[in-house]
Amino acid sequence: MWADIDVFDPAQLRAPATFEHPKQLAQGMAYVLVNGVPVIAEGRMTPALPGKVLRGPGFEKHRR
């Protein structure tokens, strides 16, 4: 089974992104694991990209 896990402190969770600066990492996320691989570790992004695109049954219908 594929799974994602987030470890965070709800009291510290903040989203500092704005329209002017949209690429801001959320604060308070200690660890995020995607398919068992850390993409955020100790509050910092890692270079890992273990995710994959999930396409539902309607994808081919709306594809051009």
Image (spheres, grey):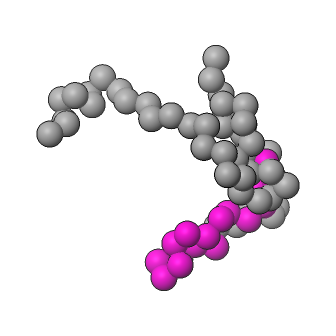
Residue located farthest toward the top when viewing the structure as drawn: 1
Which quadrant of the structure image shows residue 49?
top right
The picture places residue 45, in percent across and down from the top left corner, at: 71, 57
> In percent of the image, x 77 and y 59: which residue is there?
44
Viewer-proximal residue among 29 and 53: 53
> In percent of the image, x 66 and y 30: which residue is there?
35
The picture places residue 48, in percent across and down from the top left corner, at: 66, 45
Which secondary structure is most common in the magenta stretch? loop
Viewer-proximal residue among 12 and 33: 33
Left or right: 9 as drawn, with respect to 36: right
Relative height, residue 24 to residue 21 (above, below): above
The picture places residue 63, in percent across and down from the top left corner, at: 19, 36
The picture places residue 33, in percent across and down from the top left corner, at: 72, 39
Residue 26 inside the magenta-drawn segment: yes
Magenta-highlighted residues:
16-31
Residue 21 inside the magenta-drawn segment: yes
